[in-house]
């Protein structure tokens, strides 16, 4: 199985758009650096994250794990790991994005 642009490329682009939406939604919870450590500065950020951002992140995590598993399953007989590396890189990107957002709260 080779990296198919129409199927896998569209999925990567959708994940890129979802990453931008994630940053847009999570940036509403970020606090100014000079207010870090000030009591009450976060203003309920965990509640906002659970109500808004996690609803985007949960289904995407499940769909990405399914897509990665299918790519690995189909790549096993041919030993062409290009889609697996692409989706593993996307997972690393999501982890970095979540850590970046969490460092701002």
Image (spheres, helix red, strand yellow):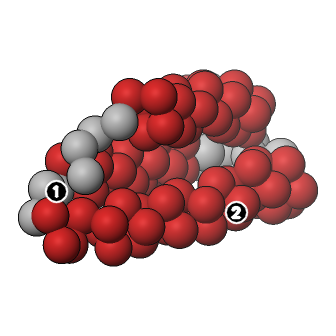
Image-based side of 92 in relation to 59, left or right: left
User: Residue 24 at what x, y percent from top left?
Assistant: 69, 26
In terms of depth relative to the viewer, which is nearer, 6 or 55? 6
Q: CA distance from mark 2 to mark 1?
A: 26 Å
Q: Answer yes or no: is residue 23 visible.
A: no
Q: Secondary structure at mark 2?
A: helix
> In percent of the image, x 62 and y 67: which residue is there?
62
Q: Secondary structure at mark 1?
A: loop
Residue that mark 1 sits on: 81
Q: Mark 2 or mark 1, which has the lower sequence index?
A: 2
Q: Answer yes or no: is residue 25 visible.
A: yes
Q: How many marks?
A: 2
User: Residue 55 at what x, y percent from top left?
Assistant: 81, 56
Which of the labelled discs sits on residue 58, or is there none?
A: 2
Which of the labelled discs sits on residue 12, or is there none?
A: none
Image height of 94 relative to 84, above or below: above
- Image quadrant in which you'd find residue 71: bottom left
Image-based side of 75 in relation to 52, left or right: left
> In percent of the image, x 89 and y 56: which residue is there?
51
In terms of depth relative to the viewer, which is nearer, 84 or 56? 84
Image-based side of 99 in relation to 59, left or right: left
């Amino acid at each position: 199985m080779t990296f198919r642009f129409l199927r896998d490329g569209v999925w990567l682009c959708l994940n890129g758009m979802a990453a931008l939406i994630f940053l847009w939604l999570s940036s509403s919870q970020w606090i100014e650096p000079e207010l870090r450590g000030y009591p009450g500065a976060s203003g309920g950020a965990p509640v906002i994250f659970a109500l808004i951002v996690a609803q985007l992140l949960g289904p995407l995590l499940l769909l990405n794990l399914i897509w990665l598993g299918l790519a690995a399953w189909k790549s096993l007989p041919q030993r062409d790991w290009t889609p697996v590396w692409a989706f593993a890189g996307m997972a690393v990107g999501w982890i970095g994005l979540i850590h970046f957002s969490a460092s701002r709260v």
